[in-house]
Image (cartoon, rainbow, N blue to C red):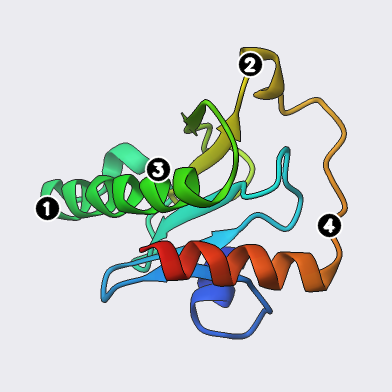
Amino acid sequence: MPSIFSKIINGEILSYNVNESDNCLAFLDAYPLKRGHTLVVPKKEVDYLFDLESEDYKILWEFARDTAKAIKKVVKCKRVAVVVIGLEVPHAHIHLIPMDTIEEINFSLPKLTIPKSEMEEISRLIKSAI
């Protein structure tokens, strides 16, 4: 059964994409910790990040770096945190989260509800910064 991320990649589920290549997709998290919280996924469905083939792994991290730089240009923050948990969705992914303090990177905090118009604007701004 395809993961929710595969369904997003295939356009079956609405997403606010911010960056895309032949191998990877970056889109705003539907349940973000912060505005600009982005998920970076390989288009190839692999459950565990460290099970990616070596070349795919390198491509994913370079893509994540480019995406994080664009996020930093658009969202006011000290850093863009990189978080890999890998338990909630069986598809390798990287969280890129704008942050000012370490306390903000706590997945037990309540998630934000961001209006569709703002998600579209954030997505547009990050895309334009790439």
What type is the residue that disc 1 sits on?
A: Glu
Tell me which residue sits at (73%, 58%) in the image. Answer: 30
Question: How far is the residue under mark 2 from the one under mark 4?
Answer: 21 Å
> Could you say which is closer to the camera, residue 22 or residue 120?
120
Quadrant of residue 120 in the image?
bottom right
Q: Position of residue 76 (x, y in %)?
A: 60, 39
Label 2: few (<14), some (14–19) or many (≥20) C-alpha neighbours in 10 Å: few
Q: Earlier in the sequence, mark 3 or mark 4?
A: 3
Helix, strand or loop under label 1: helix
Label 3 and label 1: CA atoms lie apart by: 15 Å
Q: Which mark is residue 48?
A: 3
The amino acid at mark 2 is: Thr
Comparing 95 with 114, the one in front is 114
Residue 50, given in percent of the width and then of the height, sits at: 29, 37
In this rendering, the label closer to the viewer, 3 or 2: 2
Write down the residue under mark 1.
55
Q: Which residue is mark 2?
A: 101
Q: Amino acid at mark 4?
A: Ile
CA distance for labels 3 and 4: 29 Å
Sequence-wise first label, 4 or 1: 1
Labels 4 and 1 touching (C-beta < 8 A): no
Q: Earlier in the sequence, mark 2 or mark 4?
A: 2
Helix, strand or loop at mark 2: loop
Disc 3 residue crowd, few under 14, some 14–19, many 20+, Cα 10 Å: some
Mark drawn on residue 114? 4
